[in-house]
Amino acid sequence: MMLAKLKQALLNLANPERAIQTARFFKTGKGQYGEGDIFIGLSNPQVRTLVKEYWEKISIDEIQVLVNDEIHEFRFTGLMILVEKFQKTKSEEERSEMVDFYLSNVSKINNWDLVDCSCYKILGEFLLDKDRQVLYDLAASKHLWSERIAVVSTMTFIRKGQFLDCFKLSEYFLNHPHDLMHKACGWMLREIGKRDELALEEFLEENLSKMPRTMLRYAIEKMEESKRLSYLKR
């Protein structure tokens, strides 16, 4: 019953004009990374408002229904409810079960916003005090969204001053063919630079000649202008 109410509440907010723009933004055309995805035109704040209302009322099984849905915003809502549940529980057993659920649904976490809204808040947070081999398994998967999950999950570590996994994964993806991975790595490197610019500069000195232009531009975005331009010229 609650799931049906939530779905209807989402549908009631549908905005066909916005849906067209959003579908274009998330590259849903033939041959693009989001090919065939369906949008109904909701904003993130609209979804988050409903998540606050429903997260306690929706079960893991019902989250699975949302995550399985062809409508992008339904999957987004399901993931955001999972994040809320994960953050609210104090039970390590429940957290472990939610991580297993998350990893078993990687194929449904199939656009960059779905990855970025959830991975570091669930997987990254869970792995803070644990072995992180799962990130390297995801990185080696040759599956774009699993690869992005691996890198963006390091956000949690970076915020705790732990940079090694981000550096290792960014180096691993230097030759990745997709700019979405260049952007993800550059974003995480920039987050390191905001906390420890010297650590970022050391990484850049070692890898600058191999680094994709997009990754570099993202990584140095917050540097002062003259330093940023000197990296771009090199």
Image (spheres, helix red, strand yellow):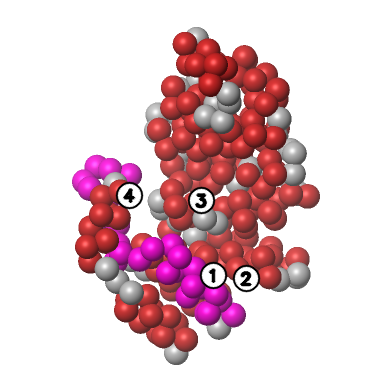
Q: Which mark is residue 145?
A: none
Q: Look at the numbered disc 1 and give the secondary structure of its residue.
A: helix
Residue 149 x/y as whole percent: 53, 46
The residue to which callout 3 is attached is 116
Q: Earlier in the sequence, mark 2 or mark 4?
A: 4
The answer to which image quadrant residue 161 occupies is: top right
Is the stretch drawn in magenta largely helix, strand or loop? loop
The residue to which callout 2 is attached is 85
Give amino acid for label 2.
Answer: Lys
Name the residue: 59% across, 32% down: 189
Q: Earlier in the sequence, mark 2 or mark 3?
A: 2
Query: 10 Å neighbourhood of mark 1: few (<14), some, or many (≥20)?
Result: many
- Residue 189 against residue 66 in the figure, above or below: above
Outermost residue toward the bottom? 1
Q: Is residue 35 magenta?
A: yes
Q: Which mark is residue 81?
A: 1
Residue 51 x/y as whole percent: 51, 73
Image quadrant for the N terminus?
bottom left
| C-beta proximity under 8 Å, tags 1 and 2 | yes
Outermost residue toward the front? 225
Q: Look at the numbered disc 4 and give the secondary structure of its residue.
A: loop
Q: Nearer the viewer, residue 19 or 184?
A: 19
Query: 10 Å neighbourhood of mark 4: few (<14), some, or many (≥20)?
Result: some
